[in-house]
């Protein structure tokens, strides 16, 4: 397996993948809940205005739209993922050239120090005064 493997091609098992548990539904649940909460608030403000019964009508609208939006979004997720994978190609990584290691830098530093007739002073730690 290469250094870059797209998430949909990985073979390592995940605990949530394919599960019908709450954990697999949580992203869709939160996304649709927040989105419908915001949209219904904005639309209620535009249509009704800020009246005494704004909060009650907003909650009524939200509790009506969220149960519709969540199952639709959850069932559409595999299709949307498939379409987005087909529209985007995995990144093709160019072969990386050999990098410089810390050990190589230290070796060159030591060689240049010796060539120039210099010596390396031992690091002096600050004295702790009590």
Image (cartoon, rainbow, N blue to C red):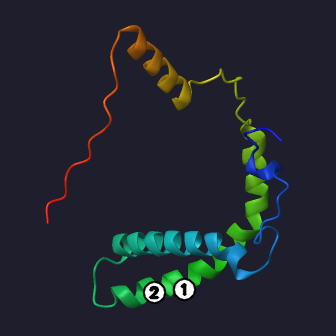
In this view, the residue in front, 129 or 73, is 129
In what element is the residue under mark 2?
A: helix
Residue 52: percent from the left, percent from the top?
Answer: 28, 90
| Badge 1 element | helix
> Is the C terminus in the top left, top right, bottom left or bottom right quadrant?
bottom left
Residue occupied by mark 2: 59
Q: Position of residue 15 (x, y in %)?
A: 77, 72
Is mark 1 in CB contact (under 8 Å) with mark 2?
A: yes
Give the distance between the C-alpha atoms of the residues marked 1 and 2, in whole angstroms: 6 Å
- Pointer 2: residues within 10 angstroms few (<14), some, or many (20+)? some
For the N terminus, which image quadrant? Answer: top right
Q: Which residue is mark 1?
A: 63
Q: Residue at x 64, y 75 (%)?
A: 26
**Depicted 119 relative to depicted 72: above or below:** above
Taking the spot 45% from the left edge, 86% from the top edge, the residue there is 59
Residue at 42%, 83% in the rendered image: 58
Residue 83 or residue 26, whichever sits in front: 26
Between 94 and 110, which is closer to the camera in this rendering? 110
- Classify 10 Å Cα crowding around label 1: few (below 14), some (14-19), many (20 and above): some
The location of residue 25, given as percent across then percent down, is: 69, 75
């Amino acid at each position: 397996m290469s250094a870059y493997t797209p998430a949909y091609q990985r073979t390592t098992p995940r605990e949530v993948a394919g599960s019908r548990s709450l954990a697999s539904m949580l992203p869709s649940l939160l996304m649709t809940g927040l989105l419908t909460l915001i949209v219904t608030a904005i639309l209620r403000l535009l249509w009704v205005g800020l009246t005494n019964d704004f909060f009650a009508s907003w909650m009524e609208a939200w509790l009506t739209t969220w149960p519709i939006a969540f199952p639709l979004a959850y069932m559409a997720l595999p299709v949307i993922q498939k379409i987005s994978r087909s529209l985007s190609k995995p990144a093709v990584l160019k072969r990386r050239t050999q990098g410089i290691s810390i050990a190589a830098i230290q070796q060159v530093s030591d060689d240049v120090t010796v060539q120039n007739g210099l010596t390396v002073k031992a690091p002096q730690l600050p004295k702790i005064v009590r």
